[in-house]
Amino acid sequence: MSAVGFALAALLAGAVGCTSGSGDAGKKSDGATAGTKGAQPAVADRACANGTYTWTNIEKPTRLLGVSDVETLGKGGGTLKHKVRRLATVRIAVQAGSSAPAAKEILISLGKKTGVIDSDDDVSGFTDVGGKGPELNDGGAAPEGSGRFVQYAAVRVVEADFRYTCPGGRTTFGHAESWSVSIDGLLECDTGTGNATAREAARLSCGADSTAAKAA
């Protein structure tokens, strides 16, 4: 397989974003903006029961977590030995007013809204409040072609603002974030790519003037 083939096979996803709402929440009100600033973690014992969630500003960006140093392989390729070094982490967290439910319940609602969670029994690590995202791989990719290779790790983040309305009308605003997909990528410095996350990794390891770092 050529270096291009390996680069394309490894690029699982590009940077993706979307915005969504439900009910009458097409626009985030000034109150929602104010409610998320300086908000405290949700406190379960002050929350009302049977409230209604309205999610807005849903985004699913791909975030680069780490890159390896460049490793050169000759004809026939080989196994890469450089490990991916961490550049960033992912937060699994909720910020909300005191009348919101517990953070885990809020994250379950976000997961169901975005399709990450199918049922309450399938919450996996999405609701692990305080978690830092996936572990980085230890390298070990084995391209068959020659070239200058970089391994990288990324993650698909899921975050959104929400409004939680109690049956009596009391409303609190907040923000929740977690992650859904772990990505292990491989690129070749002298091969172009249409993947924005791979280009970011190439700029950091191959250099800004490398072919892989430039927009296709």
Image (cartoon, rainbow, N blue to C red):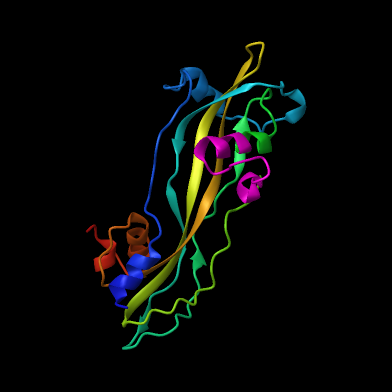
The answer to whether residue 18 is left or right of residue 174 is left
Is 115 magenta? The answer is yes
**Vertical arrangement, residue 117 with respect to residue 206, above or below:** above
Residue furthest out toward the top: 168
Q: Residue at x 32, y 57 (%)?
A: 195
* Picture mark count: 0
Q: Nearer the viewer, residue 142 or 159?
A: 142
**Vertical arrangement, residue 87 with respect to residue 5, above or below:** above
Residue 90 position within the rendered picture, expressed as x and y whole percent measured from the top left: 55, 50
What range of the chain is rendered magenta?
Answer: 108-128
Q: Residue at x 33, y 63 (%)?
A: 203
Q: Nearer the viewer, residue 20 or 62?
A: 20
**Vertical arrangement, residue 81 with respect to residue 115, above or below:** below
Q: Residue at x 31, y 88 (%)?
A: 75
Residue 17 image-quadrant placement: top left
Q: Residue at x 38, y 46 (%)?
A: 16
Is 139 magenta? The answer is no
Residue furthest out toward the right: 45
The answer to whether residue 79 is left or right of residue 37 is left
Residue furthest out toward the bottom: 75
Residue 144 position within the rendered picture, expressed as x and y whole percent measured from the top left: 36, 82
Please state, as top left, top right, bottom left or bottom right, where the C terminus lies in the image. bottom left
Please state, as top left, top right, bottom left or bottom right, where the N terminus lies in the image. bottom left
Residue 129 position within the rendered picture, expressed as x and y whole percent measured from the top left: 66, 44
Residue 176 seen in render: no
The answer to whether residue 102 is left or right of residue 65 is right
Residue 12 seen in render: yes
